[in-house]
């Protein structure tokens, strides 16, 4: 009886071993690659882009809505973060992905148009001109982001580390024919759900990033010139009938959202 049981388990264990090896060999599924790209592009880079326009922040703020929700038609976000009243409006296409972003702060309006090829974001136009471009590797993963600025360009290259949920980000500053690698060490890491876990880009470094079951940011630690373990946490005080937040608070900071659905 024991021998028969062992003979049954042996091929089962072999099959599981082959299956796990196959999964490891194949790496991330297309769905997971898209989810990781969303984290690196929207949760990290686009939030960094918008945070920079505020000009008065020590940490990257998650302005961008959770890209996993595809039922949005339009969303308007207002806040007083950084001590400045501001409005950020997101317009979505019929596939539920962001098509336009208008960010108004410091008496200026920054207009972003998102251009896709298939499901991949390839270009962002700012005030009608192509300013941000995205490249991908043969696995569909984000390979590089190039941001034109001040007559030159900042090229962020993502180098994925085998066996780790991490990518080093190599910055190259481009001025004409000259390409100057930055000595700064940038990186991004992510959790098992492919959401950001920590990162360091430009002057912004955050760690211990935590999310709710709905994918909303709960808390993270960040560094500034005085301290490297500041804690930022959000209380989601009001949700709508679809259980998406419409008000959140962190001490004296308040964010409000008005959401239109398809």
Image (tube, rainbow, N blue to C red):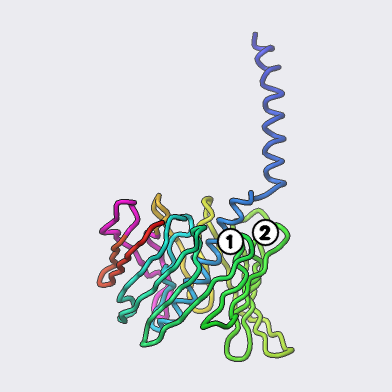
Q: How many marks?
A: 2
| The image quarter in which residue 233 lies | bottom left
Q: Neighbour class for label 1 at 10 Å: few (<14), some, many (≥20)?
A: many
The segment highlighted magenta reads 217-245
Q: Which residue lies at the image location 32% right of the left edge and 72% below the top edge?
A: 78
Residue nearer the viewer, 142 or 173: 142
Residue 74 in the image: above or below residue 193: below
Is 96 included in the stretch rendered in magenta?
no
Write down the residue under mark 2: 140
The image position of residue 172, as x and y in percent, is 66, 80
Q: Which residue lies at the image location 72% right of the left edge and 35% below the top edge?
A: 18
- The single residue placed furthest to the top in the displayed view is 1
208 displayed left or right of 11:
left
The image position of residue 211, as x and y in percent, is 41, 56
The tag on residue 115 is: none
| The image quarter in which residue 1 lies | top right
| The image quarter in which residue 120 lies | bottom right
Write down the residue under mark 1: 37
The image position of residue 4, as x and y in percent, is 68, 12
Q: Assess whether mark 2 and mark 1 are in contact (beta carbons under 8 angstroms).
A: yes
For numbered disc 2, what is the local secondary structure?
Answer: loop
Residue nearer the viewer, 224 or 51: 51
For numbered disc 1, what is the local secondary structure?
Answer: helix
Q: Neighbour class for label 2 at 10 Å: few (<14), some, many (≥20)?
A: few
């Amino acid at each position: 009886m024991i021998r028969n049981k062992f003979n049954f388990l042996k091929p089962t264990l072999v099959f599981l071993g082959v299956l796990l090896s196959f999964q490891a060999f194949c790496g991330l599924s297309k769905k997971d690659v898209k989810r990781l790209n969303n984290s690196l592009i929207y949760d990290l880079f686009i939030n960094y882009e918008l945070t920079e326009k505020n000009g008065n922040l020590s940490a990257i703020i998650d302005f961008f809505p959770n890209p996993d929700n595809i039922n949005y038609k339009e969303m308007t976000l207002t806040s007083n973060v950084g001590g400045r009243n501001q409005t950020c409006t997101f317009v979505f296409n019929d596939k539920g992905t962001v098509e336009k972003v208008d960010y108004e702060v410091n008496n200026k309006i920054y207009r972003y148009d998102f251009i896709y090829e298939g499901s991949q974001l390839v270009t962002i136009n700012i005030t009608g001109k192509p300013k941000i471009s995205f490249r991908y590797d043969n696995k569909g993963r984000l390979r590089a982001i190039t941001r034109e600025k001040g007559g030159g360009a900042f090229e962020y290259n993502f180098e994925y580390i085998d066996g780790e949920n991490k990518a080093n980000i190599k910055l190259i500053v481009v001025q004409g024919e000259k390409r100057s690698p930055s000595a700064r060490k940038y990186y991004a890491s992510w959790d098992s759900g492919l959401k950001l876990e920590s990162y360091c880009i430009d002057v912004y470094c955050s760690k211990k990033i935590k999310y709710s079951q709905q994918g909303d940011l709960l808390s993270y630690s960040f560094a500034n010139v005085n301290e490297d373990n500041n804690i930022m946490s959000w209380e989601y005080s009001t949700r709508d009938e679809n259980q998406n937040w419409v008000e959140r608070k962190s001490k004296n900071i308040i964010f409000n959202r008005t959401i239109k659905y398809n």
